[in-house]
Amino acid sequence: MSKPVSGRYLSFAEREEIGLLRAQDVSVREIARRIGRSPSTVSRELTRNAATRSGKLEYRASVAQWKSDLVARRPKPAKLVTNQRLRVYVQDRLDGKIRDAQGREVAGPRQAPFIGRNKPHRGDRKWVNGWSPEQIANRLQVDFPDDPSMRISHEAIYQALYIQGRGALKRELVSYLRTGRALRTPRARSQAKAWAHVSEEVMISSRPAEIEDRAVPGHWEGDLIIGLDRSAIGTLVERSSRFTMLVHLPREEGYGLIPRTKNGPALAGYGAITMANALKRTVTKLPTQLWQSLTWDRGKELSDHARFTIESGVKVFFADPRSPWQRGTNENTNGLLRQYFPKGTDLSRWSEQEIQAVALTLNNRPRKTLGWKTPAEALNDYLKSANQPGVATTG
């Protein structure tokens, strides 16, 4: 009897159950349901580990267990070590010279010698074929359709590159992969939830339909415009009137003096707590009815949105990843603001008074979508119709 295995693999008892049920002509899906496994697992087991001595596939638990133990033995010789033809093919697709239409080699720039670190930062990289392991693995089936020896998985190529002792490929070939990482990103990190602060109830899909038609003011879109050295200004735009408010985000005390540390204090001016407090102060400048909801980008600067909603009464929703059109009004306004706050400039040098002067300028600029009214006029018209005093100003 073989030694116990982890629950990831079929046990001998499960194989016996599969053999008995298969002899009774029970379907693959029913067998999978009874033993609590995936149908694809059962299907592969019946094909891969069946006995073949009789000239046809017959499933017997003892033979299946013997075959499973045989292929599970470690260490195995790496395929790229034992198959030189396959190794040459893989290596040429990774670091082979690029050529022009006439087949002449094109040297390209010279890359610094590989020293076990990531690709050069903002530096030249060697021009090579640079196929990805996935491209190589799948192209082998096209180039050698009738040669089963010319097969390898993309994971086997990655292991040959990154794991010392797998041996077949030169370590420096990792610098020719697209990412150029000297070390693989751990799976837990690559699968980590990037937006843990965004739950289902605050997704834009949960936003009330009445917000979409822009009929009633009070629904805003927001984001940050980022400048040099992590400086930023918060931008808020009302969806109906296009009225703009800017949020001053000065540096926190100690910025530039205290060394940056992982998970250390957010001193740039738009950490989660600082951002929520700054928005709360901004909300109080207009009547409550003009602050019903706020649709924000996916940035973690508003990860304290739950407290902001409780203290201000403004519901927060988040746009989908990489979907700027869901906050089109805000994106358009940010483009207008770049006339005053260009990319690559230090935004922390501007005072509260100065950025509010820019907001006032935008709010007094006529807009075609408003019938050539200004945002300030459009918002004041709504307030008058609601019997509220005109307060649409940021000055």
Image: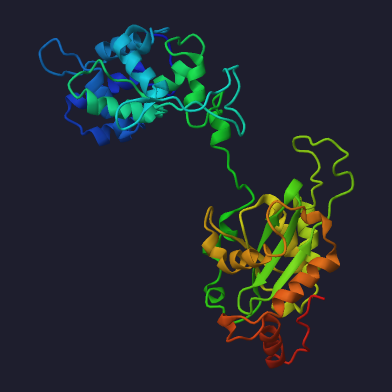
Residue 215 visible in the snapshot: no
Residue 51 image point, x, y percent:
19, 14
Q: Reply above or below: 70 against 336.
A: above
From this viewpoint, which residue is outermost toward the left?
Answer: 55
Q: Quadrant of residue 350?
A: bottom right
Residue 31 image point, x, y percent:
27, 31
Viewer-closest of 288 and 331: 331
Q: Reply above or below: 246 against 347.
A: below
Q: Say left or right for 27 vs 358.
A: left
Which residue sits at x=76%, y=79%?
A: 287
Which residue sits at x=59%, y=69%?
A: 329
Q: Say left or right for 157 vs 256.
A: left
Colouring style: rainbow
Viewer-closest of 188 and 19: 188
Residue 156 image point, x, y percent:
40, 20
Q: Quadrant of the C terminus?
A: bottom right
Q: Quadrant of residue 285?
A: bottom right
Q: Reply above or below: 78 against 28.
A: above
Q: Quadrant of the N terminus?
A: top left
Q: Say left or right for 306 vs 189.
A: right
Which residue sits at x=28%, y=24%?
A: 140
Residue 383 visible in the snapshot: yes
Residue 103 image point, x, y percent:
30, 26
Badge count: 0
